[in-house]
Amino acid sequence: MRDGKLLLRITLVLVLVLCLLARQSSAYMKILTAPGHPVSLIVEHDKGRIRKAYFRSPEGVRSLEQIEQHLLLSDSFFFLRADGDMLDDLVWKIDLLQPKSEEMLSLWITSVTETSTAWLALAPAGSGFWESLPRSPLPREDVFLYVAPHLPAYEKLARRSGPEILTFIYTMLLTKSGPKLAAIPEVYSRLLPLTSLVSKAQEDDGLKAAYTALHQDFERMGQGAMPSREAIENFRWKRILTVRWKR
């Protein structure tokens, strides 16, 4: 109990110091929280550009240098049931933009209550054709989707992206050991009619070949198998931090 109170005091002192520094440098502090979970993201920013970023949990405060100098765009979260304690487990997505390259990426924060653990990962982000389509309910309470911003480089074609491109959807399984890529057949079986339709309707030969390969990958994953090498290489989810704390 004493350790917990001491840690809380240290965190509060750190936040106060950061606030004072922010006032002196014309920057601002922003604290993002996830309801029902003891984790938060503390950022010092100037006109949206992150100068300093910290991840706070009962374990302590960790610096997140990986997202410094990015623009903070938005955040969203939802809850899953990934363990057996009947409490909501967290999937939290924070969208960022690199001003120089204009590339988008997302900071994914996932946490499972039973193991008192949080995992942080960075992954490319962007808008694609999937974003304009209605989402069907997922078949399991421990699954979420990662929609990649690029179509894999099938047939040695350059990776393509954009709001009119059908990119790759990866099903992620949240476990007591963290999120992992998994082939969930029920999800891909639902996607097959659409990928088949788009592939047949495509007039561009290169894109038609790529969509045919995409459909074949979804067919394999609809049978529980893993996708092609190109699809695996297109999956650029990178874990950057794992934090565990005592209950």
Image (spheres, rainbow, N blue to C red):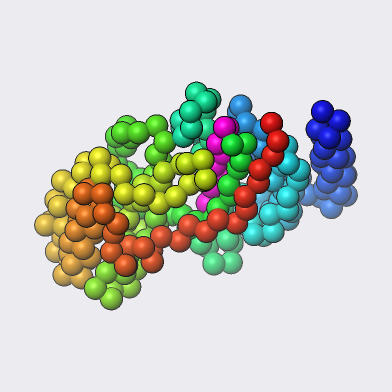
For the point 55% across and 36% down, the residue is: 112
170 or 173, which lies in front? 173
Q: Is residue 57 left or right of residue 189?
A: right
Q: Residue furthest bottom?
A: 156
For the point 66% across and 37% down, the residue is: 39
Q: Is residue 30 left or right of residue 89?
A: right
In the rendered image, the vertical position of residue 208 relative to residue 79, given as above or below = below
- Give coordinates of residue 64: x percent, y percent: 68, 54
- Give coordinates of residue 66: x percent, y percent: 64, 59
- Give coordinates of residue 240: x percent, y percent: 60, 56
Q: Is residue 54 left or right of residue 84?
A: right
Image quarter of residue 70 = bottom right
Inspect the magenta stretch and tell me whether residue 13 lies in it: no
Q: Is residue 17 left or right of residue 143?
A: right
Q: Which residues are magenta?
A: 104-114
In the rendered image, the vertical position of residue 218 relative to residue 92, given as above or below = below
Q: Does any portion of residue 9 appear in the rendered image?
A: no
Q: Does any portion of residue 126 appear in the rendered image?
A: yes
In the rendered image, the vertical position of residue 247 relative to residue 10, given as above or below = above
For the point 82% across and 28% down, the residue is: 1
**Where, quadrant-wise, is the C terminus in this rendering?**
top right
